[in-house]
């Protein structure tokens, strides 16, 4: 079986695809990953052959992103989903993805929620697709509600009949890494939901943490993902986190991402260490709590490790949803969205550390994740889908 995985150039989006791609490869199937040219190194590091497609033209993305600071949180999020992901990204990637599908002839396409060019290329060739969710159940329905017009435009560019892509989107098989207990904390689980699997337990790097601060103080991991550091409106959140935790009886490890340099933050409090990057699994294996922005990769990483978290949503709908779900299951708390949310969330960290119920709830969700079937079982589902 030939399996083509398709992703945008975002670690948090590629992450949910990786375990399924790896399971297919381990089972002896051919796997390639279609991703923007700029994301080639990440695909290679993950151990997969890269099928490149064009990045979104900066001259188109730039004006859209420049509008975001003038919009409300919801308006900005809708604009990014509808205009960047569904129109600019998808139209840029379509020609190469059509070529890849026609040339390589995959038996099935696995795509993450924000990557839509592969949906059009697959529909054009009659290849089945699987939608790998990059968040809670609300994210997929939120995307679908916003992308109607860009999706029809994409379909026309692909030479498809009107309504074809909308029908294809609605009929996709869906995979998720989120257990029902987290995805539907109210217990109201609808019929016909996604097939759920767990990501294999990470191999925690043996490397120890650097020396800093009081080694007896609880470790708080602070991360705002791989994108925040490249967004000028949110450049101040790293300093806000350091200042808010400077007087706390904790040891802080803050990562700023590969697009920033720690020296840019100025003087660092004695209880903090700032690095561009550190293996997340290695930190979470030792952390007492995490302060994050609600990105899917960081949120699920903490839950898999059974670590309670404080969520400060910054710039997208899914971050708000993830924070709400973390709070609903008692594995942490969330605050109002926006740059000021970081200081608010940090101020509540002592409660997170002192009340053992948060850690107990995080461990309960970790158990629910571990009980899901492994991605290897998804391979059989793909074989059945292909027929």
Image (cartoon, helix red, strand yellow):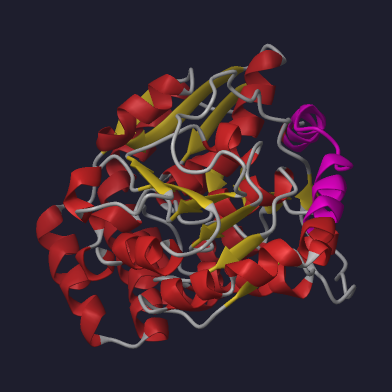
Quarter of the rendering occupied by the C terminus: top right
Q: Main secondary structure of the magenta part?
A: helix
Residue 175 visible (yes or no): yes
- Residue at image x 41%, y 49%? 272
**Residue 120: horizontal and vertical position, in percent?**
45, 51
- Residue 45 vs residue 24: left or right? left
Quarter of the rendering occupied by the N terminus: top right
Residue 126 visible (yes or no): no
Q: Residue furthest top?
A: 28
Q: Dividing the picture into quarters, in which one does residue 69 lie? A: bottom left
- Residue at image x 26%, y 67%? 236
Q: Nearer the viewer, residue 85 or 358?
A: 358
Q: Nearer the viewer, residue 109 or 140?
A: 140
- Residue at image x 46%, y 56%? 114
- Residue 156 vs residue 55: left or right? right
- Residue at image x 86%, y 50%? 368
**Residue 332: horizontal and vertical position, in percent?**
69, 67
Q: Nearer the viewer, residue 374 or 162?
A: 374
Q: Dividing the picture into quarters, in which one does residue 230 lie? A: bottom left
**Residue 249: horizontal and vertical position, in percent?**
55, 58
**Residue 55: horizontal and vertical position, in percent?**
24, 44
Q: Which residues are magenta?
A: 362-385
Q: Residue furthest left?
A: 59
Please say if 285 is above or below 191: above
Residue 300 inside the magenta-drawn segment: no
Please say if 68 is above or below 350: below
Q: Nearer the viewer, residue 230 or 343?
A: 343
């Amino acid at each position: 079986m030939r399996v083509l995985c398709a992703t945008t150039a975002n670690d948090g989006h590629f992450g949910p695809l990786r375990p399924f791609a790896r399971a297919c490869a381990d089972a002896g199937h051919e796997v390639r990953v279609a991703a923007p040219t700029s994301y080639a190194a990440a695909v290679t590091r993950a151990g997969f052959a890269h099928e490149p497609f064009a990045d979104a033209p900066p001259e188109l993305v730039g004006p859209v992103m420049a509008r975001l600071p003038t919009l409300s949180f919801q308006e900005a999020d809708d604009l990014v989903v509808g205009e960047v992901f569904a129109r600019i990204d998808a139209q840029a990637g379509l020609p190469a993805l059509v070529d890849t599908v026609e040339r390589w002839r995959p038996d099935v396409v696995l795509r993450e929620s924000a990557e839509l060019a592969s949906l059009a290329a697959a529909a054009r060739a009659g290849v089945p697709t699987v939608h790998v969710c990059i968040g809670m159940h609300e994210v997929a329905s939120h995307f679908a509600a916003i992308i109607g017009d860009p999706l029809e435009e994409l379909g026309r560019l692909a030479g498809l009949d009107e309504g074809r892509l909308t029908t294809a989107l609605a009929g996709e098989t869906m995979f998720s890494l989120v257990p029902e207990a987290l995805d539907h904390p109210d217990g109201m689980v609808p019929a016909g939901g996604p097939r759920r699997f767990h990501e294999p337990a990470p191999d925690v790097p043996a490397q120890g943490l650097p020396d800093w601060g009081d080694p007896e103080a609880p470790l708080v991991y602070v991360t705002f993902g791989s994108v925040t550091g490249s967004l000028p409106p949110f450049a101040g959140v790293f300093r806000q986190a350091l200042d808010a935790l400077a007087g706390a009886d904790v040891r802080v490890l803050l990562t700023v991402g590969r697009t920033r340099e720690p020296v840019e933050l100025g003087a660092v409090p004695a209880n903090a260490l700032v690095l561009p990057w550190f293996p997340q699994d290695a930190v979470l294996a030792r952390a007492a709590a995490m302060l994050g922005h609600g990105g899917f990769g960081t949120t699920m990483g903490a839950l898999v490790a059974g670590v309670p978290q404080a969520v400060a949503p910054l710039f997208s709908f899914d971050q708000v949803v993830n924070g709400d779900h973390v709070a609903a299951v008692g594995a942490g708390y969330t605050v109002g969205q926006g740059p000021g949310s970081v200081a608010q969330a940090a101020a509540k960290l002592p409660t997170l550390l002192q009340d053992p119920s948060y850690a107990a709830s995080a461990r309960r969700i970790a158990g629910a994740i571990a009980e899901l079937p492994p991605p290897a079982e998804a391979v059989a589902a793909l074989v059945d889908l292909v027929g």
